Image (tube, rainbow, N blue to C red):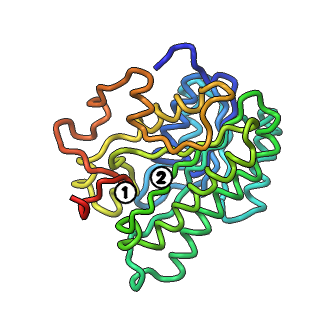
C-alpha cells in the first residue's frame, strides 16, 4: 500500500460500525488520524454480540483518531439526519460515507417472513439510499468526497437468486445505489462498491454457522485495508466500480494475503455473488 495516502483530518460517517467490517474500517482510518462517526444501533452491550458504538469510539481514540458515537437506526430518517448534522457540527463536514449497515436472512421464498423481508430492504436498500442522501450535501463541499457501499457486483446469474431471493434483492439495492449515484454525481462524488472475495469472519457469520465456519474465512482487516486504498484514491479516480478486496490490494502490490486468514492453512470459502458458483462447476 502506498505510503503517501492518508485519511488524516478526513471525516468518515460509517453505518453499522459497532463491530465487524465497519469497526475494522473505522480503526484503520483512525490510525491515520481521521475523524470517525460511528452511526449504529448498539449503544449498550448485546447479550451475544461484541461491541457498542461507545467501545468502538474508545478504540478509535486509542488508535489516534477522533470519534463521535451516535445511536442511529438507518431505517429512521430523523435519526440519520440528526447524526449527519451532529457530525458536521462536531467535525465541520463529512468527507466519506461508508454504507456498511446490513441485514441478512438467507432463506428461500416460502420460508422468509415478510417481516424479515421488509427489514432487509429497509436496512440495506432504503438505509443506504437514505444515508447517502443525508450525507451528499456535505460531501459535495469536500475536496475528495467518497461514498463506499459494502455491496456486491450486480451478478444476474440465477443461482444467486434462487436460494435467497429476498436477501439478494435487498443487497443488490445497495449495489444499484452505486450505479445510480455514481452517474448522477459524476465528477462530483466518487461512488464505489466493495465486496470480499471470501467469507469474512464476523459475528454475523458466527450466528449463522458457528465458530467452525469462521475458520474458513478471512479477518475483517482485509476489507479495512482495501477500503483504505479506495477511500484515499484522489478525486477523479474510478467511480461506479464494483471492487473486490484482493484485487484492490493487488493493485497496490499486496498479493500475499496469508496474514488475513482466520485459520492459516484452511481452504477459504468464497463469498456470495461471485462466480463460479458450486452449481456452475
Task: Tell me: residue 80, above or below residue 75.
Answer: above
Residue at 62% over, 29% down: 237
> Taking the image as drawn, is residue 72 in sight?
yes
Residue found at the very far bottom of the displayed protein:
110
- Residue at 47 percent of width and 68 percent of height: 167
Indicate the position of residue 67 as horizontal and vertical percent values. Answer: 65, 35
SS at mark 2?
A: loop
In depth, the one of 119 and 41 nearer the eye is 119
- Number of the label disc, if any, that sits on residue 119: none
243 sits left or right of 148 in the view: left
Which badge, 1 or 2, comes first in the chain's sequence?
2
Q: Is residue 93 above or below residue 40?
A: above
Residue 227 in the image, given as x and y percentages of width and height: 52, 35
Residue 72 at x, y = what percent? 67, 56
- Whether residue 73 is visible here, answered yes or no, is no
Looking at the image, which is closer to me, 66 or 261?
261
Circle 1 packing at 10 Å, graded few (<14), some (14-19), many (20+), is: some
Give the residue pinned by disc 1: 272
Instruction: Indicate the position of residue 42 as horizontal and vertical percent values.
Output: 57, 56
Q: What residue sits 72% from the left and 38% below the top?
A: 189
In the picture provided, is 101 more to the left or to the right than 39?
Answer: left
| Residue placed most toward the observer, 69 or 16 | 16
Residue picked out by circle 2 = 152
Q: Are marks 1 and 2 in contact (CB under 8 Å)?
A: yes
Work out whether 52 lies above or below 255.
below
Amino acid at each position: 500500500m502506498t505510503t503517501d495516502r492518508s485519511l488524516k483530518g478526513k471525516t468518515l460517517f460509517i453505518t453499522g460500525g459497532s463491530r465487524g467490517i465497519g469497526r475494522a474500517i473505522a480503526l484503520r482510518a483512525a490510525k491515520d488520524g481521521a475523524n470517525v462517526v460511528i452511526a449504529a444501533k448498539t449503544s449498550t452491550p448485546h447479550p451475544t454480540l461484541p461491541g457498542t458504538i461507545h467501545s468502538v469510539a474508545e478504540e478509535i481514540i486509542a488508535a489516534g483518531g477522533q470519534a463521535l458515537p451516535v445511536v442511529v437506526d438507518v431505517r429512521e430518517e430523523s435519526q440519520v439526519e440528526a447524526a449527519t448534522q451532529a457530525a458536521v457540527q462536531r467535525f465541520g463536514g463529512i468527507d466519506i460515507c461508508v454504507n456498511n449497515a446490513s441485514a441478512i436472512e438467507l432463506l428461500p421464498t416460502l420460508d422468509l417472513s415478510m417481516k424479515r423481508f421488509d427489514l432487509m430492504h429497509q436496512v440495506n436498500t432504503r438505509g443506504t439510499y437514505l444515508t447517502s442522501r443525508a450525507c451528499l450535501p456535505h460531501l459535495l463541499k469536500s475536496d475528495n468526497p467518497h461514498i463506499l457501499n459494502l455491496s456486491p457486483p450486480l451478478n444476474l446469474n440465477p443461482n444467486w437468486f434462487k436460494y435467497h431471493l429476498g436477501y439478494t434483492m435487498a443487497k443488490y439495492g445497495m449495489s444499484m445505489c452505486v450505479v445510480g449515484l455514481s452517474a448522477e454525481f459524476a465528477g462530483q462524488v466518487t461512488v464505489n462498491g466493495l465486496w470480499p472475495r471470501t467469507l469474512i469472519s464476523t459475528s454475523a457469520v458466527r450466528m449463522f454457522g458457528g465458530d467452525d465456519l469462521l475458520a474458513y474465512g478471512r479477518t475483517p482487516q482485509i476489507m479495512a485495508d482495501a477500503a483504505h486504498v479506495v477511500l484515499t484514491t484522489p478525486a477523479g479516480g474510478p467511480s461506479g466500480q464494483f471492487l473486490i478486496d484482493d484485487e484492490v490490494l493487488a493493485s497496490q502490490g499486496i498479493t500475499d494475503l496469508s496474514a488475513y486468514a482466520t485459520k492459516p492453512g484452511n481452504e477459504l470459502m468464497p463469498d456470495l455473488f461471485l462466480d463460479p458458483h458450486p452449481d456452475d462447476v
